[in-house]
């Protein structure tokens, strides 16, 4: 049994993320979900503490999973928790391009490896960016997020009346 770090901005945590957590927990035993800052996504819709709380609630049924916020670098968070490696989910070849560059950088600067988990194809279209956009306009995101996330988003962006 090993510990792995699953870093992301999780703004918000969605069903694709949950799928990666479930797969990583089955493969490695212990998963630390690290809520981190992505400099390419400066303005989050949910504050960090709320992202942690709802990711923790969404993962509560998965044994061996904990959720924490970390400042700074993913490699430092991985070292701090004694992670064997970083785990990332892949939906598309576009994800691969981005993740591969980060994986090579994290290996080069700190010797921290990355293992990829292919997402369940039924979540291949799910993205936090589109969820934010749809929720912002009062649309229905319930097919893409755990119910705890849908409830949190509904308090920030009241759903359109049907
Ligand atoms: O969910 P995201 O936004 O795709 O996650 C990206 C994230 C947060 C994992 C990435 O931006 C990151 O690792 N941020 C922490 C800072 C860091 O380690 N930067 C160097 C990356 S090579």
Image (cartoon, rainbow, N blue to C red):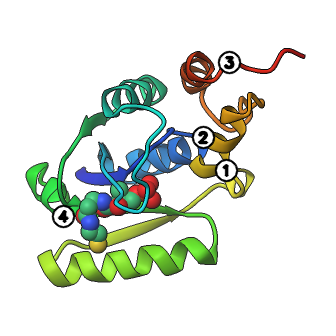
Mark 2 sits on what residue? 15
Mark 4–mark 1 Cα distance, whole angstroms, equals 26 Å
Q: Of marks 4 and 3, which one's residue comes earlier in the chain?
A: 4
Tell me if the residue at label 4 has its CB under 8 Å from ligand 1. Answer: yes
Which residue position is annotated with label 3? 158
Mark 1 vs mark 2, CA separation in Å: 8 Å
Is 150 left, or right, of 111 in this rendering?
right
Residue drawn at x 29%, y 34% as measured from the top left:
66
Q: What separation in Å lies between label 4 and label 2 (alpha carbons)? A: 25 Å
Residue 1 position in % (x across, y down): 24, 50
Let me know if residue 121 appears in the view: yes
- In the rendered image, the quadrant that contains the C terminus is top right
Does 81 sit above or below residue 137? below
**Residue 144 falls in which quadrant of the image?**
top right
Neighbour class for label 4 at 10 Å: few (<14), some, many (≥20)?
many
**Depicted 99 relative to depicted 13: above or below:** below
Q: Which quadrant of the render holds ligand 1?
A: bottom left
> Which residue is depicted at the point 26% across and 73% down?
113
User: On the image, numbered disc 4 is attached to which residue?
Assistant: 75
Task: Please name the residue shown 20% across and 72% down the image.
Answer: 112
Q: Are marks 4 and 1 in contact (CB under 8 Å)?
A: no
Is there CB contact under 8 Å for labels 1 and 2?
yes
């Amino acid at each position: 049994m090993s510990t792995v770090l699953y870093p992301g901005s999780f703004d918000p945590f969605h069903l694709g993320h949950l799928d990666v957590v479930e797969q990583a927990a089955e493969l490695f035993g212990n998963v630390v979900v690290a809520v981190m800052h992505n400099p390419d996504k400066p303005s989050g819709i949910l504050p960090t503490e709320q992202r942690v709380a709802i990711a923790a609630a969404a993962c509560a049924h998965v044994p061996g999973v904990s959720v924490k916020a970390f400042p700074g670098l993913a490699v430092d968070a991985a070292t701090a928790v004694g992670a064997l490696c970083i785990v990332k989910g892949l939906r598309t070849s576009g994800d691969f391009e981005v993740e591969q560059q980060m994986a090579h950088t994290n290996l080069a600067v700190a010797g921290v490896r990355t293992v990829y988990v292919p997402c369940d194809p039924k979540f291949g279209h799910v993205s936090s960016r589109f969820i934010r956009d749809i929720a912002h306009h009062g649309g229905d995101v319930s097919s893409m997020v755990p119910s705890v996330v849908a409830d949190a988003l509904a308090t920030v962006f009241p759903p359109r009346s049907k």
